[in-house]
Amino acid sequence: MEPLERIKEQVESHAVVIYMKGTPQLPSCGYSSRASQMLQACGVPFAHFNVLADKEIYDNLPNYADWPTFPQLYVKGELIGGHDIMLELYQKGELKSLLEAAVA
């Protein structure tokens, strides 16, 4: 399966998914660490993919939704954004309700 097809399948098969450097338990960069902490604080289940463990995903994900950086958060198949957008939504109290609605 082609990398973009795999990404599409992953994004569409999970209500909430984050592509990050490392894992929530062992993040490999500060942005990924803070992004996964925000998701965990919301208390909603989410899938995660370590882009450092899959070179094809790492190389192709920026082209999937035209977003050049990691982490990337997808909710119900749509790109929400990276750490900065997640932080803004979290601080406004909007991230939790967005995620809860996605998994309901």
Image (cartoon, rainbow, N blue to C red):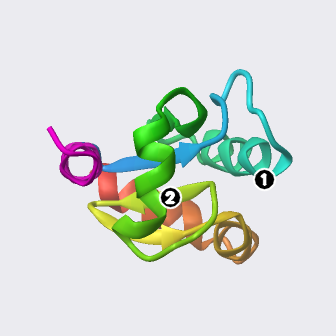
Figure quadrant of residue 93: bottom right
Q: Is residue 91 left or right of residue 95?
A: right
The residue drawn where x is 63% and y is 28% is 23
- Secondary-structure class at tag 2: strand
- Secondary-structure class at tag 1: helix
Other-residue count near label 1 (Cα within 10 Å), few / some / many at <14 / 14–19 / ≥20: some
Q: Is residue 23 above or below residue 96?
A: above
| Marking on residue 73 | 2
Q: Is residue 25 above or below residue 64?
A: above
The residue drawn where x is 14% and y is 38% is 1
Q: Judge by depth and name the residue closer to the eye, 3 or 76.
A: 3
The residue drawn where x is 63% and y is 56% is 70
Q: Is 3 in the magenta? A: yes
Q: Is residue 17 left or right of residue 3?
A: right
Residue type at mark 2? Leu
Q: Is 78 in the magenta? A: no
Other-residue count near label 2 (Cα within 10 Å), few / some / many at <14 / 14–19 / ≥20: many
Residue 91: percent from left, percent from top: 76, 71
Q: Is residue 46 visible?
A: no
Q: Judge by depth and name the residue closer to the eye, 66 or 23.
A: 66
Please tell me which of labels 2 and 1 falls first in the chain. 1
Q: Residues in magenta?
A: 1-13
Q: Is residue 94 visible?
A: yes
Residue type at mark 1? Tyr
Question: How many numbered circles does the render carry?
Answer: 2
Q: Main secondary structure of the magenta part?
A: helix
| Marking on residue 31 | 1
Residue 88: percent from left, percent from top: 72, 76
Mark 2 and mark 1: Cα distance apart in space? 12 Å
